[in-house]
Each structure stands twice: as C-alpha cells, then as structure tokens.
Amino acid sequence: MGSSPRVTAVLPVRNEGAFLLEWFAHHRSCGFTDFLVFSNDCSDGTDAMLDRLAALGWLTHVRNDGPHPEGPQWAALKQADRHPLIEASDWVMPIDID
C-alpha cells in the first residue's frame, strides 16, 4: 500500500492574522498536507504567528519583505519554485488566503 500524496499549498500573506488559524484548519481538513507561506510587510503580527506555527511544525514560513518590482505574489511564486518543499510534493496549489 502506497503512502498518501503530499499536497502543498503555496500562499502569500500580508496582515492576515485574524484569519490564519481558521484558514489552515479548513485547508488541512480538505486534504492539504503542507503549507509554504510567504509573508510580506506585515504590521499586525501575522509574521510572528507564522514563525510560531512554523516552530510547531505546522507550516513552512518564508519572510518575503520587499522591494518587489513585480509584486509580492510573483516574488513568492518565484521563490517557491526553487523551495525544497515543492520538490518533495506530489501536488502543489498556489492559493490566496482571502
């Protein structure tokens, strides 16, 4: 019997602290096994929450502070393409938190 597929969500976030835990719980219940999260320019503590969740092993957090000539989403996706978590994934879905 084979192992379950590794399904990774890649998402850029900025000031989403109020929604983080509910969002991750919902998407974990939908079958996502991993989260690669890129935070940029947060002023509401989102990046600190992500650091803590990463320390607990719930996700992988990458700080993606600017400048971003093409926008923070494109910068995040370009970085994600080279990230080891993506290489280890069977399925990858870029997704937005809101």
Image (tube, rainbow, N blue to C red):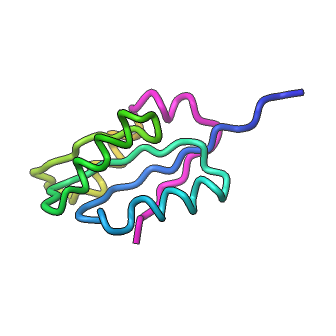
Residue at figure coordinates x 42%, y 43% from the top left:
36
The answer to whether residue 21 is above or below residue 90 is below
Judge from the rendering whether residue 50 lies leftward or rightward of residue 94; answer left or right: left
Give percent across and percent down for residue 61: 33, 41
Asked whether residue 83 is drawn in magenta, I would say yes
Q: Residue furthest right?
A: 1
Give percent across and percent down for residue 80: 39, 40
Q: Quadrant of residue 89?
A: top right
Residue at figure coordinates x 15%, y 48% from the top left:
65
Q: Nearer the viewer, residue 25 or 81?
A: 25
Residue at figure coordinates x 41%, y 35% from the top left:
56
Q: Quadrant of the C terminus?
A: bottom left
Residue at figure coordinates x 90%, y 27% from the top left:
1
The answer to whether residue 73 is above or below residue 86 is below
Q: Which residues are magenta?
A: 82-98
Q: Residue furthest bottom?
A: 98
Give percent across and percent down for residue 20: 39, 60
Judge from the rendering whether residue 64 lies leftward or rightward of residue 60; answer left or right: left
The answer to whether residue 86 is above or below residue 21 is above
